[in-house]
Image (tube, grey):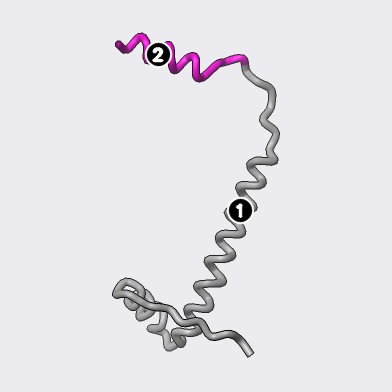
Amino acid sequence: MADTITIRTDAETEHALAVLTQGGRSRSAVIRQAVLEAASRRERAAEMRRAVLRMPLGEPDGIDVGGELSQDRDGER
């Protein structure tokens, strides 16, 4: 048997639930789907972050961006 979850809703949540249940789906079904979709999005985002961190940085191009910005700012004064 599945566990029962109790949530406290506010006006914004009630409106969202009303929109999601317009087609006749139960509150329980739309909440379950929303939780699963949120978890899936979070897992995909974490995987994308890991993929970016695994990407090779390539060879340095010899430009010191921090130094360049610093010189530009010094010239603006």
Which of marks 2 and 1 precedes in the sequence? 1
- Residue at 32% over, 71% down: 12
Q: Is residue 9 found inside the magenta-colored segment of the image?
A: no
- Tell me, for residue 72, which label it has, or none: 2
Give the x, y percent position of residue 77. 30, 11
Give the x, y percent position of residue 2. 61, 86
The N terminus, quarter of image: bottom right
- Residue at 50% over, 73% down: 34
Give the x, y percent position of residue 36. 56, 71
- Residue at 62% over, 18% down: 61
Q: Is residue 70 found inside the magenta-colored segment of the image?
A: yes
Say if 67 sits above or below 1 in the image: above
Between the residue at mark 1 and the residue at mark 2, the CA separation in whole angstroms equals 36 Å
- Amino acid at pointer 2: Asp
Say if 23 sits above or below 52 in the image: below
Camera-side residue of 16 and 5: 5
Left/right placement of residue 57 relative to residue 8 reads right
- Amino acid at pointer 1: Ala
- Tell me, for residue 11, which label it has, or none: none
Residue indicated by mark 1 = 46
Which element carries disc 1, helix, strand or loop? helix
Magenta stretch mostly in which secondary structure? Answer: helix
- Magenta residues, as a range? 62-77
Which element carries disc 2, helix, strand or loop? helix
Camera-side residue of 22 and 17: 17
Residue at the far bottom in the pictured view:
1
Q: How many marks?
A: 2
Residue at the far top in the pictured view:
75
- Residue at 37% over, 11% down: 74
Left/right placement of residue 74 relative to residue 58 reads left
Q: Residues within 10 Å of mark 2 (few under 14, many from 20)?
A: few
